[in-house]
Image: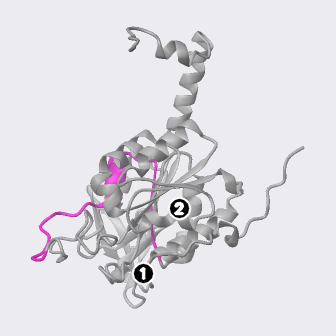
Amino acid sequence: MTATLPVYTKKDFQTDQDIRWCPGCGDYAILSAVQSVFPELGIPREKFVVVSGIGCSSRFPYYMNTYGFHTIHGRAPAIASGLKISRPDLEVWVATGDGDALSIGGNHTIHMLRRNVGLKVLLFNNRIYGLTKGQYSPTSEIGKKAKSTPYGSVDRPFNVLSIALGAEATFVARSVDVFQPHLKATLKHAAAHRGTAFVEILQNCNIFNDRAWETVTERDVRDDHTIALEHGQPLVFGKNKDKGIRMNGLDLEVVTLGGGLTEKDLIQHDVRHPNPAYAFLLSRMDGMAGFPTPLGVLRAVDAPVYEDGMSEQQRQVIAKKGAGDLGKLLNAGDTWTVR
């Protein structure tokens, strides 16, 4: 007899913990979106685990009525990977920030991505260290004046999507904290992906880096500064939908439609393109004069999943050598008895 899955609501994924984020923080919007999406995934609540590192975003597990780990700085990908490998049946989500994931945790992040462990990773990017009160982060722009860079940062910032694609992540997407319908749709796409699903969420820190993404979020300018990526659709943007992206040799080019140029001349977005170089080109539009910020799924391809490979390897070894004996293993080889 098949058990019937309970009908969940957003309230089922809320906790009784006081939410300790600053009023107006973009984290509230992300939390609301995740709590709204989880009930729609058709997964028992006890199968969810939320893992975090350190930072404002990493308080996330306290506010999700699921299993969870609040781990140590930068180590969420490693701990989440270990959990997913040992319990492939669990739905493991990672909440992290631009500092947590890309500074002290950068090494763990890229190896998680290259292995294609079945995790869903939400990287909150506010371009600042918020929890430690306003130091510049790996994604802060050149010239950023902060408490640790009073004369302006001289560091080149990381391009978050480019890092993920360079590590050959199989699912890479971007959304914005306050774009709730878009964010929820992106989270659902990520949830359906087998392997590492990496979602950068542009998030506002109204205390230490307010309006960091104003060209993306402000109603009067966002249509000209963002482009919605939809699989199978031409890359069109602008308030009047009169601008587009096409290839010019090995480079992207912004063009104005009309005068003989139509949507057929533009790139038709393909999230399943096998070569990550295509999605990488899209990620490089960030910061290029005249180019929009891409939002949506850049890449979603199938590839072997790490925990499947591990499980199959274990099955083969057990079939060949038996289940093994931990006591024998610990006492194998050179051992000493200390009296």
Amino acid beneath label 1 = Cys
**Position in image of residue 286 (x %, y %):** 29, 68
Q: Quadrant of the C terminus?
A: top left
Q: Nearer the viewer, residue 277 or 190?
A: 190
The numbered disc on residue 61 is 2
What's the image's color scheme? one colour
Q: CA distance from mark 2 to mark 1?
A: 17 Å
Say which quarter of the image contains residue 67: bottom right
User: Looking at the image, is mark 2 or mark 1 earlier in the sequence?
Assistant: 1
Q: Residue at x 78, y 64 (%)?
A: 7
User: From the viewer's perspective, is residue 326 above or below residue 157?
Assistant: above
Asked if residue 258 lies in the magenta stretch, the reply is no
Answer yes or no: is residue 304 visible.
no
Q: Quadrant of the N terminus?
A: top right
Instruction: Say if residue 7 shows up in the picture.
Output: yes
Seen from this angle, which residue lies furthest top?
333
**Which residue corresponds to mark 1?**
22
Question: Is residue 152 located in the magenta-colored stretch of the structure?
Answer: yes
Q: Which residues are magenta?
A: 150-177
Secondary structure beneath disc 2?
helix
Q: Is residue 39 left or right of residue 27?
A: right
Where residue 251 sits, quadrant-wise, is: bottom left
Q: Name above or below for residue 40 compared with residue 303.
A: below
Report the label total: 2
Please tell me whether mark 1 sits on a helix, a strand or a loop.
Answer: loop
Query: In percent of the image, x 39 and y 10: which residue is there?
Result: 335
Picture coordinates of residue 65, whole percent (x, y): 63, 63
x and y percentages locating residue 333 in the rendered image:
41, 8
Give the residue type at disc 2.
Answer: Pro
Left or right: residue 105 compared with residue 188: left
